[in-house]
Image (cartoon, rainbow, N blue to C red):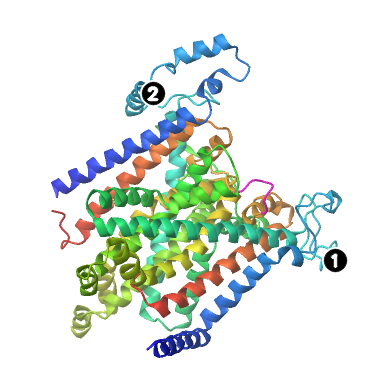
Amino acid sequence: MTSEKGLMRKIIASKRMQSFLRDPSGIVGGIILFAFFFAALFAPYLAPTDPYDLTTVDLANFLLEPSWMDQGVSAFPLGTDDQGRGILSTILYGLRTSLIVSVSVVTISSIVGIILGMLGAYYGGILDAFIMRTADTVFSFSTTLLAVLLLGVFESRGLFTVIIAICIADWVKYARTIRGSVLEIKEFPYVTAARSSGAGDFRILFRHILPNALPPIFVLMAVDMAVVIMLEATLSFLGVGVPLTEPSLGMMIAIGKNYIYAGMWWMVVFPGITLIGMVVGINLFADWLREELNPKL
Amino acid sequence: MTTYLAKRLIQGVIVLILVSMVCFAMFRFTGDPVVMLAGKDATYEEREQIRVAYGLDRPVYAQYFSFLKGAMQGDFGRSYVSQIDALDTILERFPATFELAVTAMCISFVLGVGLGVIVSISPNGVISRMIMAGSLVGISIPTFLIGILLVMFFSVYLNIMPSFGRGDTVQIGFWRTGLLTLSGWQHILLPALTLSGYQLAVLIRLTRAGMRETLSEEYIKTAWAKGLSPAKVILKHALRNVMIPVVTIAGLSFGELIAFSIVTETIFQWPGMGNLLLTSIFETDQPIIVTYIMLAAFIILSINILVDLLYALLNPRIRYD
């Protein structure tokens, strides 16, 4: 029985793997995603210079062109910004911020959203009404607006504050999605069977209902990663996101914006391409995942 | 219908009251308003005078009720920075934001639905594939980057478009409009395109999905069989039904539109509410921030209720009882 089960699992896994390899958008997205995670993880080894180590940053290197242009220097392949920091190195460190924020936000808000949505759908009544009305209100404000307003009000600035502010606005999507699934699943005969065999609420929720409600959540998590990466960049661009001491793609673009009229395009274009590439990669991967899991989103 | 409307209105009021409580708490407990009002160099006596003059020595609930009373009469206090009435300051900026948002919505609606229909008519054509690829890129570029790239191309590289401000405006009563001058139209084009970008991509995808579903319905086959012209089948029979979810989503994403107007206004130095909000955040000008939040909540809730009513109007099958 166990070996049969294991074999089945293997077949499913290999089928999934095959469809992954057959679908060009899935594989392109997967490769892009892997490359960005790799670059972020090994940023200290890959970056030619450390843009946040004040002993190595030299103000004399400010506003250098990319190395293939006339004024370029080979030590800074993509040029430098107004503080003499290498664009390539800052992008690599900025990727870390993007990925730390998006992975943390997706993890925290999916857990919070799943638990609240599940409890609301399962128990119903006032609890459900309260959670869903709150969710509706948060939803109509939109994640972006709420995050900007919260960060405008918060006294302290930092990576942690940004993560919390986005989470407060973001859990709603998960709660709404899981609620729909749970409402449907809890009426299935097998749940009634589990209950009549004496299983407690906790066991029914987490062992019987949750696993079947997860596929749409996985797709949502993938899409949400891209959304949160863009949101963090937007917040940092506006100046309410991560503090000046942290590298961020959004802030790089905000600084670069001051120099576009002087024809210094590289401070905007390279971080911009990185941002778009990362988001496109995640969206392609999410498209593949959606086709594969085929949940009704 | 009336009961439903009444229920929604009561819900809306409750939400507004909750928002006002959050705003008040923020107003009262982040930073000391007395220091804000009196200035950092004020003596102890001066501070006590301010405390009594502004009623800050009373219990918290009494302060909340007077805040609520003021808010209902449109009195949110004065800006810490300019000492001008907070609501007046924001309402003065309202026309600029409103014109920008409406222009952006028109662009995204006309282009989004139009392109979505084109894509659904010939899903495998070269043009359709290009449009769909474009919409994938569209949802993958954050609004602020669209704006900067537009500025770089049209204002810096081609040098044919202005990149900041509203241009010449005309004052009509309390409303200052930029839509009556040529320079006003030139100035609104890039910001409006920027703001419409995200919604445009979403609307293309939504229209395409809806059209694909509707075009395979029986009544569309009947319409074709009757020998109606393609324009009549597609525009009159199919598109009408597709519009229902499109209008709903467009209306419900109004909060998103307000959020992205903050971003757009910052890039283009557009003298609207969003730009004011961001400046106020940096200056910790709390009365302005609070007023902005309350006004945004009011607008968003009203639009949501309107969309619900419109939904019933567009689709007679829906009755809220």
Give the quarter of the image for residue A87.
bottom right
Residue at image x 41%, y 51%? A142
Q: Which residues are magenta?
A: A242-247
Chain letter of the residue carrying label 1: A
User: Which residue bears the numbered disc 2?
Assistant: B60
Q: Is residue A44 above or below residue A250?
A: below
Q: Is residue A124 left or right of residue B43?
A: left
Q: Amino acid at mark 1?
A: Ser
Q: Is residue A295 above or below residue A95?
A: below
- Identify the mark at residue A74; answer none if there is no mark: 1
Q: CA distance from mark 1 to mark 2?
A: 63 Å
Give percent across and percent down for residue B132.
Answer: 46, 74
Task: For residue B127, say whether it is visible.
Answer: yes
Q: Is residue B124 left or right of residue B144?
A: left
Give percent across and percent down for residue A127.
Answer: 27, 50
In the image shown, does B218 or B78 lie closer to the viewer? B78
Q: Is residue B72 left or right of residue B287?
A: left
**B59 in the magenta segment:** no
Q: Are marks 1 and 2 on the same chain?
A: no
Chain letter of the residue carrying label 2: B
Q: Is residue B35 left or right of residue A176?
A: right
Residue at image x 61%, y 73%? A34
